[in-house]
Amino acid sequence: QVQVMESGGGLVQAGGSLRLSCAVSGRRSSINVVAWHRQAPGKQRELVASIVGGGTTNYADSVKDRFAISRDYAKNTVYLQMNNLKPEDTAAYYCRSVVGGIDFWGQGTQVTVSS
């Protein structure tokens, strides 16, 4: 059984920083991709950043140079460091882990950026 759990969300002022964590339990040797997505009210869920097993990362244009995704293999945890946050980054952030070709999603963590 694979479980995905996010943490680290909160309220921050514009220009501030937050670090989100995504802990993945179960079948760690089969985890291929871990990605962060976000969904703002009234908008579609969008991909923010992803990291594959070899360490290759990918970012949405809107967060490049501000966000950084990283992985701690020993803890089976993926982090999303978010710097210079903007009000438009306000959203629920979800972690997705691909294990054996199957997507597993966390419950999400809210990030609110005040202007």
Image: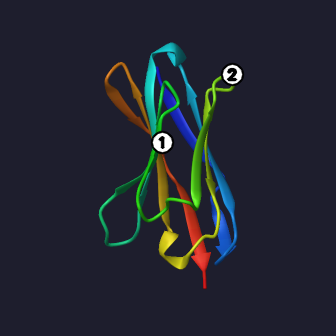
Instruction: Please tell me which residue lies in front, 81 or 39.
Output: 81
User: From this viewpoint, which residue is outermost toward the bottom?
Assistant: 115
Name the residue beneath numbered marker 1: 106
Name the residue beneath numbered marker 2: 74
Q: Dot 2: few (<14), some (14–19), or many (≥20) neighbours within 10 Å? A: few
Look at the picture and state if 14 lies above or below 52: below
The x, y position of residue 52, in whole percent, is: 46, 31
Q: Is residue 68 left or right of residue 46?
A: right
- The secondary structure type at the circle numbered 1 is loop
Number of numbered labels in the structure image: 2
The C terminus: image quadrant: bottom right
Q: Is residue 15 left or right of residue 53?
A: right
Q: Residue at x 31, y 69 (%)?
A: 43
Q: Dot 1: few (<14), some (14–19), or many (≥20) neighbours within 10 Å? A: some
Q: Is residue 107 left or right of residue 19?
A: left
Look at the picture and state if 70 lies above or below 59: above
The x, y position of residue 44, in whole percent, is: 29, 62
Q: Residue at x 65, y 63 (%)?
A: 83
